[in-house]
Amino acid sequence: MQTLSYPSHVIPKLSVDEVALTDDTVAKINLAQIARPGTFIAKTYWDVVETLADMLDILEIHSPGIPDRDLKHRSVLRLAEILMLRCTSLSDYLGQLLTACAPEGADDELKQCRQAIAKRLGRNLRVPINKTKHAGFTVAPIVLTNGMASVPGFVVYGPLQDGLSGPLSFSRKHGGGTPEGFSLPLFMRQVLANIFAMTDIARERLTRWGSIDARPDAALAQNPNVERVASLSGMLDRLNAQPFYGFEGEHTTRSPKFLIAEGTLCMQLAQTKRLRGRVIVNFQLPYVHAGAKFQMPYWK
């Protein structure tokens, strides 16, 4: 069991550390004209929590027919893109915060820390949003089912080589290391875990540089009201209830499970399972142009 937050808090530690920033650190942040970590990180965190709740609201709606199911899936993926944007924005912000606070002669440490944050962000968040923003790709719905269970997910779909369209994983130029499909429940849990992991990397470096008191008084930090904490607990229960099945290549990835123990947010890792038996792939082509050729996902 890993404790993610300070005792009696549920937000990332770096947000609470606002109360322990040195005067010199505050001056550097003001000079760089960037937001304080206490405000920006907390807002990003609660944006992610509320977006996850909105996604769960849609996923839990019973869909009697294929048109309703497909519409629901597309609605969820629009929110998934918002999660990707929130995480990439947080990564960029942490880089700016570290740059502003870095002491003289710490260029190598700064570079290593920024690289560690980018690595933690991972291809599963960075690649889809970059391809949709810059290369005209889209996040397309896909579902794996064996008649007993199903796993909603998405494919990063767009133009490949030789006039072909299909999953990014088939691109000879950019496909290396990109999964063919992404499990949506695993993605949602990883987003929440990454908010804490990325901010902890930055927090450790800032503490080492003396930008933060090594033992801040968390009791001085503003804490969310009782209603917000209660809604978080309910959302986490619903998130944990989503299937723990992964797509091909995701089964070695441990999936986070979250709980609030004595007012503190904690996480443990669970095995991502393989969907067994005769698995059927349901994939929605997001767009078709004249003379198009397709590479369908999981079609060998």
Image (spheres, rainbow, N blue to C red):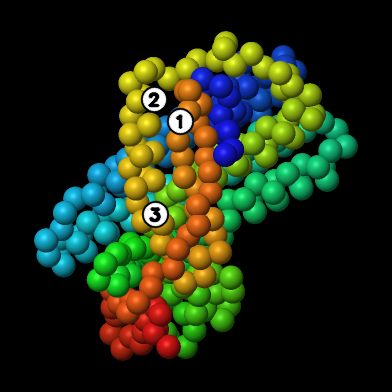
Give the percent coordinates (x, y) of residue 257.
Answer: 47, 45
Give the percent coordinates (x, y) of residue 216.
Answer: 67, 17
In the image: residue 137, left or right of residue 265: left
CA neighbours of label 2 inside 10 A, class few (<14), some (14 to 19), many (20+): some
Give the percent coordinates (x, y) of residue 37.
Answer: 58, 27
**Placement of 53 over or under 150, stated as above or below:** above
In the image: residue 288, left or right of residue 248: left
In the image: residue 103, left or right of residue 87: right
Give the percent coordinates (x, y) of residue 192.
Answer: 48, 43
The residue depicted at 64 percent of the width and 36 percent of the height is 200
Q: Observer-nearest residue: 148 or 90? A: 148
Look at mark 3 in the image and give the residue it sits on: 185
Look at mark 2 in the image and give the residue it sits on: 229
Residue situated furthest right in the rendering? 105
**Placement of 293 over or under 166, stated as above or below:** below
In the image: residue 265, left or right of residue 235: right
Amino acid residing under circle 2: Val
Name the quadrant containing residue 27: top right
The residue depicted at 71 percent of the width and 18 percent of the height is 215
Alpha carbon separation for disc pair 1 and 3: 19 Å
The answer to whether marks 1 and 2 mark residues whose Cβ atoms lie closer than 8 Å is yes
CA neighbours of label 3 inside 10 A, class few (<14), some (14 to 19), many (20+): many
Look at mark 1 in the image and give the residue it sits on: 260
Alpha carbon separation for disc pair 1 and 2: 9 Å
* Quadrant where the N terminus is found in the figure: top right
For label 1, the SS is: strand
- Which numbered mark, 1 or 2, is in the foreground of this view? 1
